[in-house]
Amino acid sequence: MAFDIVECPTMASSNGDGFVGLVIVSHSAAIASGLAELVAQVAGPDVPIVTVGGGPGGTLGTDGGRVLEALRTVDGPGAVVLADLGSSLLSVRAALAELDPIEAQRIVLVDAPLVEGAIAAGVTASTGASLTDVAGAAGEARDVRKL
């Protein structure tokens, strides 16, 4: 395939100084990886995507340690984080509190629908847009009507 999806380890190696990345956090590894595959197909291979899905041992849930590890891989201009449900959001917030201020300022947790927000963020990031613009695109997805 023409894109690279990682389970956590290195946004840094694929991002350099170029594109804003995405961190997708879900209670389900299958949802996180499937969404990353979809976003990568529409955004192209240059937008780094890191997924954190499921709890310890492959169960459903959220693994706060893996969320923190994923956030620490953020490089370049930063990353937009999208999460699915309650404890995923709590895990991201707790992980952000563990980062030093320089790391944390390049990460934006966006209140957006997971699928629509990730697609909007990925497509916007693929244009070379700023972290603020990528986060804004994800947030605007909340108001997009389907019918």
Image: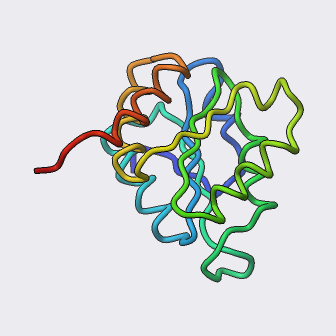
Q: Give me the residue at 66% from left, 65% from top.
A: 87
Is 4 situated left or right of 140 in this image? right
Toward the viewer: 94 or 102? 94
Locate residue 87 relative to residue 27 in the image: left or right: right
Decide: is 111 above or below 91: above
Q: Is residue 89 left or right of residue 84?
A: right
* Residue at x 37%, y 52% (from the top left corner): 115
Q: Quadrant of residue 124?
A: top left
Which quadrant of the view contains residue 118?
Answer: top left
**Depth order, front residue of 98/119:** 98
Q: Name, please, the residue furthest toward the left.
A: 147
Q: Is residue 50 above or below residue 45?
A: below
Q: Residue at x 74, y 40 (%)?
A: 73
Q: Where does the image place residue 22, in percent across and percent down from the top left?
A: 54, 40
Q: Total marks drawn?
A: 0
Residue 133 as seen in the image, left or right of residue 88: left
